[in-house]
Amino acid sequence: MLRWTPAAALALALPACGLANIETSPRPTARPATLSAPDTGNFDAWVAAFAPRARNRGISQATLDRALPTLRHLPETVALDRRQSEFGARIWEYLDSTVSATRISQGQAALRRHADILARIEGRFGVPPEVLVAIWGIESSYGANRGGTHILSSLATLAKDGRRGEFFEEQLLDALRIIQAGDISAQAMIGSWAGAFGHMQFMPSSFLTYAVDFTGDGRRDVWADDPTDALASAANYLTRRGWTRGQPWAREVVLPDGFDLRLTGQAQPAADWARAGVRVAAGAPLQSGQARLLLPGGARGPAFLAYGNYDVLKEYNLSDAYVLAVGHLSDRLRGGAALQGSWPRGDRPLTGDERRALQRRLNALGHDTGGIDGRIGPATVAAVQAWQKSQGLAPDGYVNADLLRQILP
């Protein structure tokens, strides 16, 4: 089940790794699917019914008087929430766009511009500047694209008409708590269509739990042009979720000829991987610690050994594709090389009907995909891996046309 964390808006559209198809952004530029506009009178009635529920949950009447008049129904948000792509981008296409030359150069400039504050944040929380700046670049293009949607209206719209009404009502209550605490006004709370906001795209619940006032001005201001509080808040999030100071997120590796690919997904000490002939692609020695072998593009794509900090980044966003993008961008910002392994770019993406057929077949074989929705998320990847293990295949979870032909009767 998807954990709603600071990057939850992006995670709405980013399933797990080892995929032929991934959705790449919660803010698509393509025109959303046409939907009949819901009755806004019903929205007004929903708001009226919500008010006593909010009071019972500790929201003051004064806060409601300030906030509720700002609410507007947003049909475009409903359309985006219900959007289903017939084709999704492949993982390498996502990495091409998120770890572009422009993003690398802009990120290196941001590292220089904010070097002093990033050093202070690292000193307190132990998260390297390059990791924070990589998240910043992917979440909001280094603050240039923080979103322009009224957050309270978006959350109220999704609470009434979205597919996750209970969750979004809780987020709306948390947003009202933020306003009640004086961190920001109802009108100024602006962000993405899915309810995330600020430089690092926190959801309201994550803001309440992890945001910090690093500037010392009395406000946890993740919206300001100054990104200090936002960067420190993200560092606090990662640290509290278990970030290990000095440990890498992952390393691209080269597997020896004849390597047993059934070890994919297994974790063991780096020394054991080295004895098995696994070496770092860049030529450096493997760093000590437990590491898990990942083949996100299948046996023909790059291989990675993922350390514990990989899983901490996955707490920020459940998508492995997102974690690979953040980790690789952080390496490039540090001056590292491009990935040496080649992606299977000739693989075609599966259609929505094909993805649903795959899910139906996996469920019929006893491997639960968590639904028949055409989205290759964590549950479907786990089901693919379980089937692969049952067949004695490398359990990489990689979905492509070859897998579909193998698994369908």
Image (cartoon, rainbow, N blue to C red):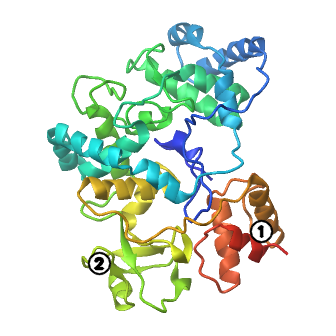
Residue 19: numbered disc: none
Quadrant of residue 44 within the rendered picture: top right
Amino acid type, mark 1? Leu
Residue 397 pos. (x, y %): 61, 70
According to the picture, the residue beneath numbered tag 2 turns out to be 286
The residue at which mark 1 appears reads as 362
Q: Residues within 10 Å of mark 2 (few under 14, many from 20)?
A: some
Front-lying residue, 105 or 298 = 105
Estimate the x, y position of residue 385 in percent, counting from the top left: 64, 73
Q: Residue at x 26, y 60 (%)?
A: 245
Which residue is at a point 29% across and 56% down the rendered structure image?
332
- Vertical side of 23 occupied by 294: above or below: below
Q: CA distance from mark 2 to mark 1?
A: 37 Å
Image check: 402 left or right of 262? right
Which residue sits furthest front? 346
Left or right, 52 with reference to 316? right
Residue shown at 73% from the left, 53% from the top: 374
Local crowd at mark 1 within 10 Å, few (<14), some, or many (≥20)?
A: many
